[in-house]
Amino acid sequence: MHCPYCVSHRSLAGATVLVTLCAMLAACGSSHKGTTAHKLTGKAKVGMVSPSQLGGQTDYAALQALYRRALAAGQRTVVVYGPSAGTDAPLYALFHRDFPGITVSGVPVVGPPMTAKLSAEFASGKHVADIAYTGNTDMLAYSAKGWLRPFMPRTLPSTSQLPADTLGPRDTFVGTSVAVSGTVTNTSLVPAKAVPTTWQQLLAPRWKGKIAMYDPTVVGEMADVFAHLDRVGLAQLMPGLHAQNVQISPATNLTGPLTAVAQGAKQLAIATPFAFYMGAKKAGAPVRFTLFDSDNYSVTLYMGQLRGAPDPLASELYEDWLLTPQAAGGIAREGAFSPIPGAPAPSGLPPLAQIKLFPVIPLPQVESADNGAIARAKRYWGS
């Protein structure tokens, strides 16, 4: 499967920030490279970033040296292919402020369309993308094809300090953000004391006909959730939720569960990304976000350096920067977590280390686990 969901800033019923189910998103955007905002003459322009913002004097010096090398090589742009690549503008702007000679641009494309674009570039030898940015299964496939070159960011903490699924095989990709999902309820319809605190409580009679969730019969978040539930001995949730007459959001209706709750058509949405909720709340929707007492769902997005990329030094600098305290703050403001130790939490969430998450499914087992969940789900929700 592709990454179960990817944080993307889009609108709720046409107006705010939402989430993209990666495997369901059609290709969009173009492969047009961004233009630099600064004409560089003489000495390279530098931002006002401090050593502490880049992780200390050693990392600061290394990143500044790499910046000068990239500019000397004429590498002044970075192109990212990925699900939220076209909507990470605040992060791109923050990087550009720190390193004003380089501009990052994104092409929002995922799944088969992203694979097709990369395949065409490798076949022709005419490379546009510098970085692939997506979920675990696609990154594993790209690594197996030899499309990713080994690279470990200079700013990467020791592996013992990182979440278990941060590193890809043979140093070909690295997790750069972690998004957490929870339950969203309508505050006008559900009192705070009635909000479920465990997965099993979703099967209570009061929730029959009142729950919305993503389609588990296709690659995406809900299939991955059920794969994790199977791993922790909660396989009964699938037939139980089917008996609850849960409203299924089709693949083409990316905002379905949250919209159903925000509009009062349903009272509760399962496994809703926090960034998704942030946008709805900001827009004034009567919604609350809660985590379970344990077994909460999260997803990691990965970044890999593409072989033959036109801007290898500049793209290494961007990935290095993404694992600094400066970038961790920007990632938190977008509703996700940086994987670096001590990274700030999005406003309204506890630190990632304090959230009781599902046990990690090892990367080599993810596709098999999710495909097994999809096969089971089709027995209940298949046509």
Image: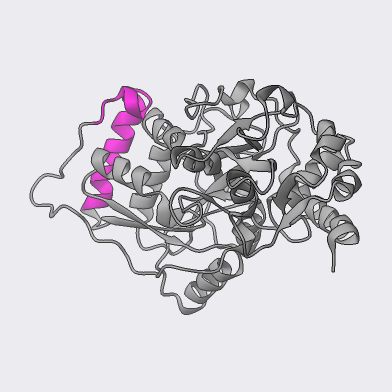
Q: Quadrant of the C terminus?
A: bottom right
120 above or below 192? Answer: below
Mainly helix, strand or loop, the magenta region? helix
Q: Position of residue 109 (x, y in %)?
A: 50, 64
Instruction: Say which quadrant the N terminus sits in.
Output: bottom right
The magenta stretch is 49-71
Quarter of the image for residue 359 reads: top right
Q: Is residue 128 left or right of residue 13?
A: left
- The question of residue 101 being in magenta is answered with no
| Nearest the eye: 8 or 51 | 8
Residue 319 drawn at (x, y percent) = 42, 44
Circle count: 0
Q: Residue at x 35, y 23 (%)?
A: 56
> Quarter-wise, where is residue 297 in the image?
top right
Front-most of 183 and 75? 183
Q: Is residue 65 magenta?
A: yes
Which residue is rendered at x = 38% and y = 26% of the image?
55
Q: Residue furthest left?
A: 42
Q: Residue at x 35, y 29 (%)?
A: 54
Q: Is residue 184 left or right of residue 342?
A: right
Looking at the image, residue 376 lies above or below residue 95: below
Any part of residue 175 in sight: no
Colour scheme shown: one colour
